Amino acid sequence: MSTSYNRIAGHSIERLAALSDGIFAVAMTLLVLDLHAPARELIHSEQDLWRTLAAMSPQLVAYLMSFLTLGIFWNGQQAQLSRFTQGNRHLTWIHIAFLFAVSIMPFSTRLLAEFIRYRAALLCYWGNVLLLGAVLYLSWRYALRSDLVTEDTTPDIRCAIEHRITVGQALYAAGAALCLIDTYVSIAFIVLVQINFAIAPQIRWLSRV
Amino acid sequence: MSTSYNRIAGHSIERLAALSDGIFAVAMTLLVLDLHAPARELIHSEQDLWRTLAAMSPQLVAYLMSFLTLGIFWNGQQAQLSRFTQGNRHLTWIHIAFLFAVSIMPFSTRLLAEFIRYRAALLCYWGNVLLLGAVLYLSWRYALRSDLVTEDTTPDIRCAIEHRITVGQALYAAGAALCLIDTYVSIAFIVLVQINFAIAPQIRWLSRV
Amino acid sequence: MSTSYNRIAGHSIERLAALSDGIFAVAMTLLVLDLHAPARELIHSEQDLWRTLAAMSPQLVAYLMSFLTLGIFWNGQQAQLSRFTQGNRHLTWIHIAFLFAVSIMPFSTRLLAEFIRYRAALLCYWGNVLLLGAVLYLSWRYALRSDLVTEDTTPDIRCAIEHRITVGQALYAAGAALCLIDTYVSIAFIVLVQINFAIAPQIRWLSRV
Amino acid sequence: MSTSYNRIAGHSIERLAALSDGIFAVAMTLLVLDLHAPARELIHSEQDLWRTLAAMSPQLVAYLMSFLTLGIFWNGQQAQLSRFTQGNRHLTWIHIAFLFAVSIMPFSTRLLAEFIRYRAALLCYWGNVLLLGAVLYLSWRYALRSDLVTEDTTPDIRCAIEHRITVGQALYAAGAALCLIDTYVSIAFIVLVQINFAIAPQIRWLSRV
């Protein structure tokens, strides 16, 4: 019987983490490439420049939202990777799929910033976030089933990690659904939820998540 | 006798891995820069936007294909690097050549996405993949010959690594040859092969690869 | 009582450092994307090319200034990270906010290079630098209060790190205020201060900083 | 006496190496952004596409040359960093200056690819390479003088590292001087020298370098 290639590839969590950090770093920084400086022909005074910069604020909000999203998912992935004893080929590919969703984020953001009033853009953005969450959830379930998780991972911790993803996704879905009212309401809701995630849940029922 | 510079350079596998992860991360993320958001002037309704996004699907397929390709070769390189006891100058330069092929991938992808019906574009793309495979094969043969491989690398593992590259390249070549029929057939074939590689060979005769 | 997610996320200083290095690396290199080669149509002789390149020098100065700024803050962040025993969720998010300010730097720089005579551009740039300094200061204070700092961090070292940020920010603010006279004076002042920071303070009263 | 900030910053060679790998990775990959796919309007047949791709070969040569240059200097920097016992603030700033020269490389390359017949472009390119070499030489001399080099660095190794840089720079300077004849001669000479460096000197008198 010959040795399967699948048994010798993808064991290094360190290199997976390094690739992930690289892709997150590039994706988070590339977002800013779409903040174009105003065209010089349109600016004739200090007032013009201030006004044009102020008019860029929706783009800046879309940018900030995506940076927060990527920050949240970077944390989520890290919390998992730090609990894996080792990788295997399948786990590696699940995380490459996750990184694919990360790398599309600058495109979804650009789309949203450009068409901030269109539901289609918001739903594409939400689809991207949904994909991030779904793959991350899959990664965790797969690692649990395949015994790739460190022994000090108590049932409590397992629950916390899963709960985190499901509650997060439920809130994102609620935010996306708000686009039936208005896309701005959606975005405001999502940004508020994310800031709450980032500065850590102070609201009681969320703090147990 | 003076010490040759060649004997003191290029020993660190860690830094080579770090450079590789960086270049893979940038190349995989840069691919998305070519997914341009539709021009705002052309979009007047939700339907317009959905239609335009749907029309981008060939580009998205080309993008997905390249992401998979880079993922596969990242895995392939990692499987090798994790088996090297140390590097030397020659091995480092073989891997810099490999990284050159990686860094050209965004260009080949852009070319293919733009000219998806042209054989010239498909053959350029295939040339790029062939270069990746050839250099990776060379790296392995060189490392074996120069005794840079860990002792636990049994003949079985050696075979698996080489077999992997040759079978992979044979399938890519078959895919490229299919462009005599139609470039879309080529691309469909390559994407299917890659997805099979990624989700791990389930087909019996491939599973031994 | 269920385990809070906040207690299991964000502990790895190593991965935070890796993400930071990645974002700094991309931001520092993206700056150069805005140095466009002159349009070929405008160049008909060697003299034309030299003249056009010489005319790009304000852009090059803005670029150099931002590279220095990012270098200074990379050093500042590193000095802190190397003194943290471990991270926690709050500290991680403070540093993600810091990285947000880093990732906006290419935009601020582009704005300044394009509108080098406008105070609005200079004040935006200064706002960015202020944000970098403020978040870094917050990070240090938070880490001290939360006992995340290594034991060999003597009061002297604590003072040095805080003093560094406050003196630096005071000088940046003074530089920004000089735009009341002229933006070029501002920029010259900031560049000189930064070079002094970089080649290490030789001036007596600064050397104690 | 207060603790100088200079004594507590910049000690980590690991993070300096990580930042360097990141900047090299981005710079090496960004080069390819300037290989634009041909405009779709100009291509009406397979022949058109092949012809247009063939016409891009000077750009591809400029790209290959820069990739080789960066590969050579990455090796050169790595050979040094692996010999440093620790860093200090000055050494860190010398390497940030080195990384500045690295980050400008995509611009110099773009300039050369666009104006391949102009001496001005070639001399700018050479100025960039000269800066890389000069700063790297300075770094080594400084580290030697400040006792930051590992003890197993014999005089032979010291000579080899210095010799490497000076011979390399002499060859680059000779290549640049050849632009008095023709810029293409310059470029051909530099590319040949670099390939020789990369595949390791086979020519006797160079092999001792």
Image (cartoon, coloured by chain):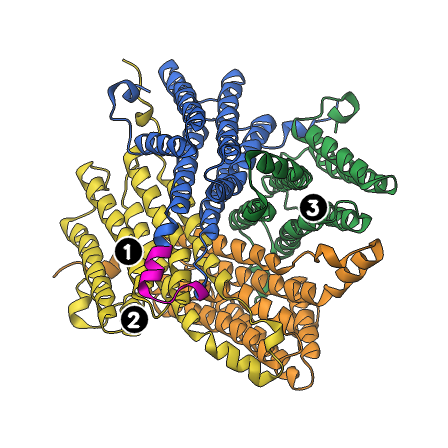
Chain colours: A yellow, B blue, C orange, D green
Asked if residue B48 is among those painted magenta in the image, a careful observer would answer yes
Determine the residue located farthest toward the right in the rendered image. D180
Q: Which mark is residue C190?
A: none
Residue at coordinates 61% horizontally, 57% vertically from top-left? C32
Q: Residues within 10 Å of mark 2 (few under 14, many from 20)?
A: many
| Callout 1 amino acid | Gly
Asked if residue B124 is among those painted magenta in the image, a careful observer would answer no
Label 1: state its secondary structure. Answer: helix
Label 2: state its secondary structure. Answer: helix
Answer above or below: position of B55 versus B71: below
Query: Which residue carries the number 1 mark?
Result: A127
Gap between marks 1 and 3 measured at Cα: 41 Å
User: Magenta segment, which residues?
Assistant: B41-52
Host chain of mark 3: D
- x%, y% of residue D140? 69, 44
Residue at coordinates 54% horizontally, 50% vertically from top-left? D19
| Callout 3 amino acid | Ala
Answer above or below: position of B81 versus A174: above
* Left or right of residue B145, residue A27 in this image: left
Image quadrant in which the N terminus of chain C is located: bottom left
Query: Which residue carries the number 2 mark?
Result: A183
Host chain of mark 2: A
For the residues tagged 1 and 3, is the chain the same? no
Instruction: Work out whether residue C154 or residue C83 is closer to the camera in this orientation and state it.
Output: C83
Instruction: Work out whether residue B194 or residue C16 is closer to the camera in this orientation and state it.
Output: B194
Query: Which residue carries the number 3 mark?
Result: D113
- x%, y% of residue B131? 52, 28
| Callout 2 amino acid | Thr
For the residues tagged 2 and 3, is the chain the same? no
Gap between marks 2 and 3 measured at Cα: 45 Å
